[in-house]
């Protein structure tokens, strides 16, 4: 269910006949109706449980509890309205060997998503890289990037987001 929600709320709201507002929010009742239309019967209580139990806290309700959105990871255009934040001195990016040549030429780029995703600790970055094979963790000199004027953001679920990471800030 978390995967399905990620698909609808990050990448393809239209596949469920939904559209996201500018902030990425969708009305909970409309979402439940759309899922039911697609044969997925979910109560509000079931949805609350999916949001609560998501291992990475991928989703959030708004303050009124009537709207829901993905905390990060979108490929569709949304403005999460995150405020720039001073990052820790060092952040980490989990990837795999086969990407290193290209990363060595271009730095980290956001690929299909809005941002490059960085982790605050090596363990998380290792797990992110391991989704694609034997993980390789790159160290990002976030302090230098921030000093050079790059804005950093942190999603509600603790993922650090940046537009790109040029090669000069990366160490293997
Ligand atoms: C790589 C999951 C070649 C990059 C995770 C990665 C994360 C390059 C892949 C979140 C490159 C993109 C995001 C370049 C970057 N040349 N390869 N220049 N620059 N790459 O999935 O960071 O479960 O878009 O290293 O936990 O792997 O979805 O990004 O391997 O937080 O909530 O291109 O997704 O969270 O892959 O993962 P992705 P990611 P969720």
Image: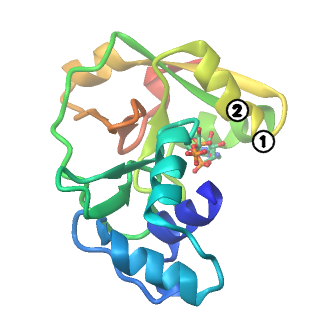
Foreground of the two, 129 or 54: 54
Number of numbered discs present? Answer: 2
Specify whether residue 151 is in view: yes
| Location of residue 128 in the rendering, given as x and y in whole percent from the top left corner | 65, 33
Query: Which residue is found at the position 22% from the left and 24% from the top?
Result: 148
Foreground of the two, 72 or 32: 32
Query: Residue 66's mark?
Result: none
Left or right, 51 with respect to 78, comes to right
Question: In the rendered image, which residue does mark 1 sit on?
Answer: 132
Q: Is mark 2 within 8 Å of ligand 1?
A: yes
Question: In the rendered image, which residue does mark 2 sit on?
Answer: 129
The image quadrant where one finds the C terminus is top right
Badge 1: residue crowd in 10 Å (few <14, some 14–19, many ≥20): few
Whether 50 is drawn above or below 167: the answer is below
| Location of residue 94 in the rendering, given as x and y in whole percent from the top left corner | 63, 29
Question: Given contact means CB atoms under 8 Å apart, are the residues at marks 1 and 2 in contact?
Answer: yes
Foreground of the two, 102 or 138: 138
Q: What element carries label 2?
A: helix
The image quadrant where one finds the N terminus is bottom right
Left or right, 162 with respect to 40, comes to left
**Ligand 1 rendered quadrant:** top right
Specify whether residue 95 is in view: no
């Amino acid at each position: 269910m978390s995967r399905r929600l990620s698909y609808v709320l990050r990448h393809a709201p239209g596949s469920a006949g939904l559209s996201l507002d500018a902030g990425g929010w969708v009305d909970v009742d409309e979402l439940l109706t759309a899922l039911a239309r697609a044969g997925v019967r979910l109560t509000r209580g079931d949805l609350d449980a999916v949001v609560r139990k998501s291992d990475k806290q991928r989703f959030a309700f708004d303050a009124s509890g009537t709207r829901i959105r993905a905390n990060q990871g979108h490929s569709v255009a949304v403005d999460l309205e995150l405020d720039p934040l001073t990052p820790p001195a060092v952040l980490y990016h989990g990837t795999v060997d086969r990407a290193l040549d290209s990363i060595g030429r271009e730095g980290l780029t956001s690929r299909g998503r809005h941002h490059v995703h960085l982790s605050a600790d090596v363990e998380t970055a290792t797990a992110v890289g391991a989704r694609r094979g034997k993980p390789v963790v790159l160290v990002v000199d976030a302090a230098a990037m921030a000093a050079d004027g790059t804005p950093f953001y942190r999603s509600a679920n603790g993922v650090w987001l940046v537009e790109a990471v040029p090669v000069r800030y990366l160490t293997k």
